[in-house]
Image: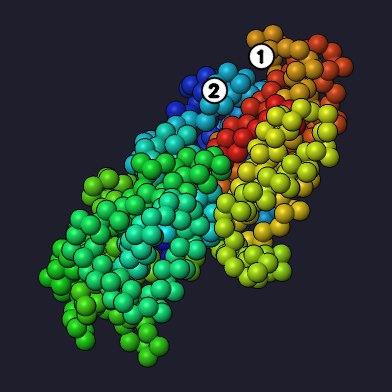
Amino acid sequence: VISLEYGAVFASPICISFGVTNDLKDKRVNIQALINDKVSQALEAAGAPAGSPAAVRQSAKVQFGDYQANGVMGVAKKLGTNPREFAQKVIEQLDLDGIAEKVEIAGPGFINIFLSKTWLAEQAENALKDARLGVAKEEQKTIVVDYSAPNVAKEMHVGHLRSTIIGDAVVRTLEHLGHKVIRANHLGDWGTQFGMLIANLERHEAQGGDISMDLSDIEGFYRESKKLYDEDEEFAKTARNYVVRLQSGDEYCKSKWQTLVKITLEQNQHNYDRLNVSLTDKDVMGESMYNDMLPGIVADLKEKGLAVEDDGAQVVFLDEYKNKDGEPMGVIIQKRDGGFLYTTTDIACAKYRYEQLGADRVLYFIDSRQHQHLMQAWTIVRKAGYVPEEVSLEHHAFGMMLGKDGRPFKTRAGGTVRLADLLDEAEERASKLIEEKNPELDAAEKANIANTVAMAAVKYADLSKHRTTDYIFDWDNMLAFEGNTAPYMQYAYTRVASIFKRAGVELTDLTHPVVINEEKEQVLLSKLLQFEEAVQTVAREGHPHVMCSYLFELAGNFSSFYEACPILNAEEDVKQSRLKLALLTAKTIKQGLDLLGIETLERM
Ligand code: ARG
């Protein structure tokens, strides 16, 4: 499957298998999948063709119940029957005994399902007892995730920030579901620019400078190298010579190249650590790793008749893509001078991930502007049979990061914003904020809170937006304590957790069962039990904003519940039941944020 639409990866949701009916009592289940399954069975029993979609979704409004099945109308239309009458037949066949307390037909043939309060309460008890909060592991797959991927001797910039943050949240989620995840940091560590970089490194060394000091401003070093290359013919000659030597494996050039890679990695690691991103040196699989494969790939593509010589270069013509004259587009895989291209590397890289890493799925978190590039590489990969169709190659594209003015995010002077500077500014701003809110805390705690809130704010602002749209970077929004922001969510967690502290109890003290009497309790609990659906959606679609929206709604449901249902002053059995709901809320928010790579605080 090459997903042609960004992120739209699977035609239908992955089916989750679980034991239905018999062992419902001791197993948390994915409610949506369970009901979907039951409605599908009923549809068939009512005469629908096998495999007709039940289309069960969470209901948009309380009055439509907890879940709604929308599949009936489509099936009735196909069968040529009246949808409401057909819905009636389906309901007669529908066995939701013990799970639902009311099922009704609405509108043109929707089926509204109201879950049983007793059943919901049982699910809550099960989730509370389980460290995974009832989120089942999925059948294990090997999943390679390509993310972050900055370039050597270039500062990481805000564009890499999006890939890093979004990719890391998806990686954490996939691992939580039990998958074998291979992080692949596709470092840009190859190309002709290394000639000038090596030549300049040599120059600095000859001057006896402190290399790691000289390269602390790596972007400056890059600019200096470029300037020398453009203005000094002698330097340019050396640089060109070094490119050739590096490509032929010359030891001297290789060791200089390694120095540049090492220094860049150290600088990046500092950013990753600050951001609590789970990447380390071990995850680096740079472009250079595929060098040895490239000649063989070109030869193989020629042999398969896919690549042909055109004006001295090796080119694959693709009917799928037309150039401006309406002719098949030519994708160059080897230049006239023998050099390989970014596309050639990505062909090799996909092949390697399938053959050597055993990938069942490969996810790429890359800027949407590289979509065409990936599609061309993968079209060639599929045609050559390097990766079978059942292994998905997925481009999870994202838009640009824009400034408040809606233009590309730049420094005041118009330069690219360095990630490290951005994180510094986030910390400064958060410190001021915490100072205003909590002047009485001691300095160390204030610093810790400010740091945690700052990194969370930067990450959450990005994670909470639909990734395919351009994203406006706005300090005031991301640090606000209201709205779908990190400070709001972190504070929501701290508040719920503090209710518990004030009650002075542990889970083991809560001997009374969960009992649902109020609508706000039911709405909160229903939402709590949808946590697994959110986790699975993020894993399937690579859209962490689904988790952010879920947590934000959950926090909102908790606030409404807390307003309507007093906890600490209630009768003992009611109090305990509500404390359990509060505890499950706190745990769910904490685990949800954790899957996003966002830390919580016990006090803020
Ligand atoms: N280094 C590239 C850049 O900065 C991103 C690489 C993404 N991964 C890939 N397999 N092409 O734009």
Horizontal placement of 357 versus 146: left or right? Answer: left
Sort mark 2 into few (<14), some (14-19) or many (20+) by Cα contacts within 10 Å. few
Q: Say which amino acid is labelled 1.
A: Leu
For the C terminus, the image quarter is: top right
Q: Which mark is residue 131?
A: 2
The residue shown at (44%, 28%) is: 19
The residue shown at (70%, 38%) is: 450
> Distance of mark 1 from mark 2, alpha carbons?
13 Å
The residue shown at (37%, 78%) is: 232
Q: Position of residue 412 (x, y in %)?
A: 68, 67
> Who is closer to the viewer here, 493 or 122?
493
> Who is closer to the viewer here, 303 or 474?
474
Horizontal placement of 353 versus 403: left or right? Answer: left
**SS for tag 1?**
helix
> Who is closer to the viewer here, 15 or 155?
155
- Along the polypeptide, which appears first: circle 1 or circle 2? 2
